[in-house]
Amino acid sequence: MQPTVLVVEDEPEIVALLRDFLSVAGFCVLSAGDAAAAGAELAEHPVDCVLVDVMLPGSSGFELCRRIRESGVRRSGAPVGPHQQHGDRHDLHASQPHQSGADQRGEVAERLE
């Protein structure tokens, strides 16, 4: 069975890019455009990893990471990782994602190997 990744991203071009890369790497990819859709996907499908855009419409991606971690809807131990395509890469570390329920960048990659 292929591991499943949920990509929470509101920009279709980014979803398509991530879907292409992840599919080639052997992952089944689900997607959601906002926090509400992500909740519905997680309630319906068990996932092995969640990649969350930090700038979602109507909700912070970090807030969604925190809610996912607290809700227990993901598979046990499934990493939750924020991603961003705008701004400086140091912005992510400056906002301290681990305090919002996101796993550290290296931890996400390590647990997917």
Image (cartoon, rainbow, N blue to C red):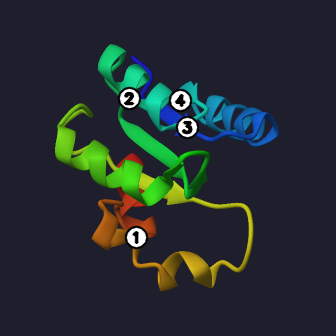
Q: Earlier in the sequence, mark 4 or mark 3?
A: 3
Residue 39 is labelled as: 2
Q: Residue furthest front?
A: 58
The Cα atoms of the two marked residues, 4 and 1, are separated by 24 Å
- In primary-sequence order, the first of circles 1 and 2 is 2
Q: Nearer the viewer, mark 3 or mark 2?
A: 2
Labelled disc at residue 70:
none
Q: Indicate the secondary structure of the residue bearing disc 1.
A: helix
Residue 45 to residue 31: above or below: above
CA separation, marks 4 and 2?
A: 20 Å
Please name the residue that numbered disc 4 is placed on: 27
Residue drawn at 38 percent across, 68 percent down: 104
Q: Can you give x and y, in whole percent of width and height, for residue 9 in the image?
A: 63, 41
Residue at x 40% of width, y 78% of height:
96
- Which mark is first along the chain, 1 or 3? 3
Under mark 4, the amino acid is: Phe
Give 83 or 20, whichever is nearer the viewer: 83
Q: Which mark is residue 7?
A: 3
Looking at the image, residue 26 sits to the left or right of residue 3; the answer is: right
Q: Residues within 10 Å of mark 2 (few under 14, many from 20)?
A: some
Give the label, 4 or 2, closer to the camera: 2
Residue mark closest to the camera, 4 vs 3? 3
Determine which quarter of the picture holds residue 8.
top right
- Which is more N-terminal, label 2 or label 4? 4
Q: Residue 76's x, y, as percent? A: 18, 38
Residue 75 located left or right of residue 32: left
Q: Residue at x 49, y 54 (%)?
A: 61
User: What is the quadrant of the N terminus in the image?
Assistant: top left
